[in-house]
Image (tube, grey):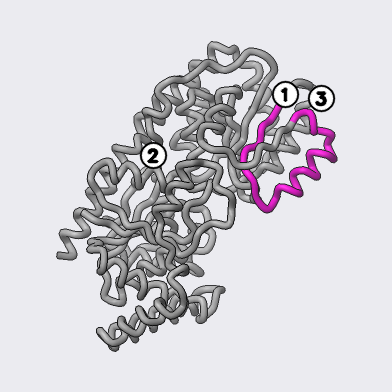
Amino acid sequence: MKIGYILNTYPQPSHSFIRRELHALEAQGVTVLRLAMRPTTMPLADPGDQAEGARTEYVLKAGILPLLAASVRAFAASPRRFLRAMALAAKLARASDRGLLRHLIYLVEAAHVKQRCAEEGVQHMHAHFGTNAAAVAMLAEALGGVSYSFTVHGPEEFDAPRTLSLGEKINRAAFTVAVSSFGKSQLSRWADFGKWDSLKVVHCGIEPDRWREVVQPPDGPLRLVAIGRFVEQKGQMVLIHALSELVGRTPEVHLTLIGDGEMRGALETAITRFGLERHVTLTGWLPESGVRRELERAHALVMPSFAEGLPMVVMEAMAAARPVIATYIAGTPELVRPGETGWLVPAGDVPALVAAIEALERTAPNRRWAMGQAGRARVLERHDSATEAARLARCFQEAIKTRD
């Protein structure tokens, strides 16, 4: 079985879950052609991401003449089908805020993707995210290519389902994947009732062998870690405000922020304004080994997000046997169980976040360890990358069989 993975910008530091999925599929005998629109402009600290970059074919690097040539060939093969695909691109453009030109570019990309999939014997296409990668896969299928599916992570797709023509993409897809039950419920809002059976839940996975050995949390003052892009939806600013209230009562508390992004300057300004320089370390993006090391040094992960899908970092913290303090949003409550594996607080509620961190500090070390072990058991049971990849491979097989 050969699958074409259609991606926008890949690999990226925050998209290690795609890499794990690809490797798990390949370990089960699936051949994967990686077709991304463009490489990332961000530095790739992880050797695994660097290796993925070398294995990925970039559509826009083909150059304008080969891309236009693929479009001409698609038109010559079936003018009627090409015009229908162009009409579909125009329909997407009318719903979008990105305009017709951008969607015609997607059509040109789709013609190249269709051609490359045919040349490589790809039997089915799968895209990650319901944004432009899914649009390219849908247009490639409309041009006469193989069937397609896509995985929706959220929250971007749930923020703008009409602008992204999410319902159109779902209804035309062989199947659509959500990464949580919450995500599936949101897809059900935009899918035709007759397509509900095509909505699948396939969790993002962790590789249990990488988390075979865990260490107990360190002794000493409370150490917290937060991991993610520095963007509004991740809520790191709420955590900085909470820390400013905590330091008066817990003067040795320390927070490590792993990641980077457009909000870094604002976070640094807030850290200085509150006099938290001694209490906060910004590491930038770290390789997986570095993330693992910081989790081992911490007593808990804090995930103060305003919007999410189902965060990989929560899974990784639980695999490392660390309790999690997170917000009661999206798919997070499907993993984080209050009093069992961590604490859940309302998003944006600084006093509630402060109270949860203080509750963590008051919790006896042996109880924290028991919570971490309960979280570890839960995530290993629900998020084994091999198990989830096998579930996805079965969906691919069914789509190919139905198409044939």
Label 1, on which residue?
253
Which residue is nearer to you in this view: 130 or 339?
A: 130
Q: Looking at the image, which residue is at 43% across and 20% down?
A: 213
The magenta segment: 254-279
Residue 97 is covered by the magenta coloring: no
Q: Position of residue 127 (x, y in %)?
A: 38, 59
In the figure, is residue 118 to the left or right of 179? left
What's the mark number on residue 248?
3
In the figure, is residue 355 to the left or right of 108? right
Q: Looking at the image, which residue is at 79% across and 29% down?
A: 278
Locate the C terminus and report the quarter of the image it occupies: bottom left
Question: What is the secondary structure assignment of the residue under circle 3?
Answer: loop
Work out whether mark 1 precedes mark 3 in sequence or the reverse, and give the earlier one.
Answer: 3
Label 2, on which residue?
205
Q: Mark 3 is on which residue type?
A: Gly
Q: Mark 2 is on which residue type?
A: Gly
Q: Looking at the image, which residue is at 68% across and 27% down?
A: 355
Q: Is residue 373 visible?
A: yes
Please tell me how crowded label 3 is: few (under 14), some (14-19), or many (20+) other residues with Cα within 10 Å: few
**Real-space CA distance between mark 1 and mark 3, rounded to the nearest whole angstrom:** 10 Å
Work out whether mark 1 precedes mark 2 in sequence or the reverse, and give the earlier one.
Answer: 2
Question: What is the secondary structure assignment of the residue under circle 1?
Answer: loop
**Real-space CA distance between mark 3 and mark 2, rounded to the nearest whole angstrom:** 39 Å
Q: Is residue 188 visible?
A: no
**Real-space CA distance between mark 1 and mark 2, rounded to the nearest whole angstrom:** 31 Å
Which residue is nearer to you in this view: 356 or 77?
A: 77
Locate the N terminus and report the quarter of the image it occupies: bottom left
Q: Position of residue 110 (x, y in %)?
A: 38, 72
Q: Position of residue 126 (x, y in %)?
A: 33, 58
Q: Kindly indicate whether the residue at mark 3 contacts the one at mark 1 (C-beta within 8 angstroms).
A: no
Please tell me how crowded label 2 is: few (under 14), some (14-19), or many (20+) other residues with Cα within 10 Å: many
